[in-house]
Image (cartoon, rainbow, N blue to C red):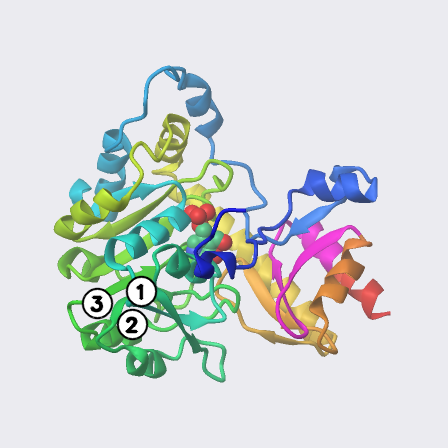
Amino acid sequence: MPILRPEIDALSAYEVGRPIDDVARQYGVDPATLVKLTANESPFGPFPGVAEAIAAETSLNRYPDNQAWDLGHRLAGELGVAPENLLFGNGSTALIADLASAVGGPGTKLVYPWPSFIMYRYAAAWAGMEAVEVPLDAGFRMDLDAMADAIDDRTRMVMLCNPNNPTGTIRSGDELEAFIRSVPGSVLVVVDEAYAEFVEDPSYRMMTDEAVRMPNVVTLHTFSKIYSLAGLRIGYAVGHADTLRSVRKAQQPLTVNRIAQAAALASLGQPDELRRRVEVNSAGRHYVSGALAERGLRFVPSHTNFVFFEMPGDDSRAWADAMLRHGVLVRPMSGGWMRVTIGLEEENRRFVEALDAVLG
Ligand SMILES: Cc1ncc(COP(=O)(O)O)c(C=O)c1O
């Protein structure tokens, strides 16, 4: 056995929501009868025109465009930034790791909220950084004061998750802006805005302007959620051109394949379709939250495509297994807490039925 870095060896294997076919095989059931609400994926297929754009991308003998010129120019136009303010990655997860490896190394610290997206913990370990996990406040929101207090002269990066996964909570644009201003310019602040499109609260604001203006601020976005391209792996960072030029040096070259670039490009410029999906999600979230409330279950009001809720007792894994036997996959978290992704109307109904079945 080779000697592993202890911080890597200590990580638990990343538990991504299992593929539905895998679960179906294990239980000997038809995958079509299962409802997967574990990974905050979109229940919709890709946007109109995407399948055609994928089929048309046949130059697969050629490496992809490392700069993603077409996609970058189009997206920059939509966001009102320059193409140099964008950096694409093999999912935003890869960009989190690229950013950490660009600024981290032995003796440095990565500060992030907890519970939050588990990849922050992985990114710290991969980059040889010490992970500093700052508990959420009593309202399950990022505790920005405590996070500011956690920053010291060894801190090289702070991750903010807004909205926060798994709790679905937000901090307002003003609160985030004040926090960002309080952080020393030598510390990279990364705002993960993977679920930004779902938020309807007027106090919320993406930190795009700050990212373009301030060399120590970067925001992260993904095509995996509202754009339904989780299977293709493409996300992007918005930031100062100088910062992104440096971060690119920490990135694996040719990381975004041709099909992902074509699919992302074809997804853009469809505001009505985007709005429709946001509205379907909001209605589903309203229904699921109402059902949890009616059953007296504690849940955290969400701004996203998932809801964090608490089952009786402290064994969420047992509840998840029980619901799986009713064909519905949800994500167990810690204690009795679980996370359910909002699906289509029928899928949400199946979730509520499974909930009733396991609650007896
Ligand atoms: C907060 C957050 N950021 C990033 C991602 C991953 O996005 P991607 O598929 O682009 O790697 C997720 C996925 O669940 C997430 O919850």
Amino acid type, label 3: Val
The magenta stretch is 327-351
Judged left or right of residue 203, residue 226 is right
Helix, strand or loop at disc 3?
loop
Give the CA separation, mark 1 to mark 3.
21 Å
Above or below residue 115? Residue 207 is above
Q: Which residue is mark 3?
A: 187
In-front residue for pair 3/46: 3
Q: Which residue is mark 2?
A: 176
Report x, y in % for residue 50. 45, 29
Q: Going 37% across and 58% down the picture, which residue do you hit?
A: 193
The answer to the question of whether label 2 and label 1 lie on touching residues, with beta carbons closer than 8 A, is yes
- Can you tell which quarter of the image residue 337 is in? bottom right
Q: Going 48% across and 65% down the picture, which residue do you hit?
A: 303
Give the CA separation, mark 2 to mark 1.
9 Å
Judged left or right of residue 93, residue 175 is left
Judged left or right of residue 34, residue 270 is left
Helix, strand or loop at disc 2?
helix
